[in-house]
Amino acid sequence: MLDRAVAAVKLDKLVALAKFNKGADGFKDRDLYPFCFNLSDGKFVAAIEQLIGTDTRALRDPTGKVFGPELYDAAQKPEGQITEVSYMFPRPGGDRTPVAKVTFITKAGDLGCGVGYYK
């Protein structure tokens, strides 16, 4: 899904971000979804609703691990390089119980984009 998300961003960034935020055109599969943030200021432009506008670099999981800077730094690497970041995060929906999550992140133009799965 990350490859598809990056291709969509390169084709038309605004359309892609709208699709990601709506989960349209196959960009949401159960708890698998893409997210993106600006490389300029770290703010989420596509993500679960409560994260939109939040600075990626400020993210901390319930165990105290500050994982936001890892996401941000991973997206600073050359386009095409995919980095894995692990942390705890609640699944989308009503249950806020943190679950182990692994995210694959890469640079896509002026965005950092990722797709993660829950273990």
Image: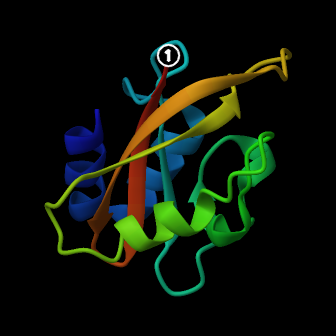
Task: For label 1, count other residues whose C-alpha is less than 10 Å away and answer few (under 14), some (14-19) or many (20+).
Answer: few
Asked which quadrant contains residue 34, the reply is top left
- Number of marks present in the image shown: 1
Asked which quadrant contains residue 100, the reply is top right
Quadrant where the N terminus sits is: top left
Q: Residue at x 80, y 40 (%)?
A: 62
Q: Residue at x 80, y 47 (%)?
A: 50
Is 40 positioned to the left or the right of 62 in the image? left
Query: In x, y percent, where is residue 5?
Result: 30, 45
The residue lying furthest to the left in this view is 80
Query: In x, y percent, where is residue 96?
Result: 84, 23
Q: Residue at x 48, y 61 (%)?
A: 71
- In-front residue for pair 73/56: 73
When the figure is inspected, residue 97 is found, relative to residue 13, above or below; the finding is above
When the figure is inspected, residue 67 is found, relative to residue 39, above or below; the finding is above
- In-front residue for pair 80/89: 89
When the figure is inspected, residue 112 is found, relative to residue 97, above or below; the finding is below
Which residue is identified by label 1? 119
| Residue kind at label 1, given as amino acid type | Lys
Q: Give the SS element for disc 1.
A: loop
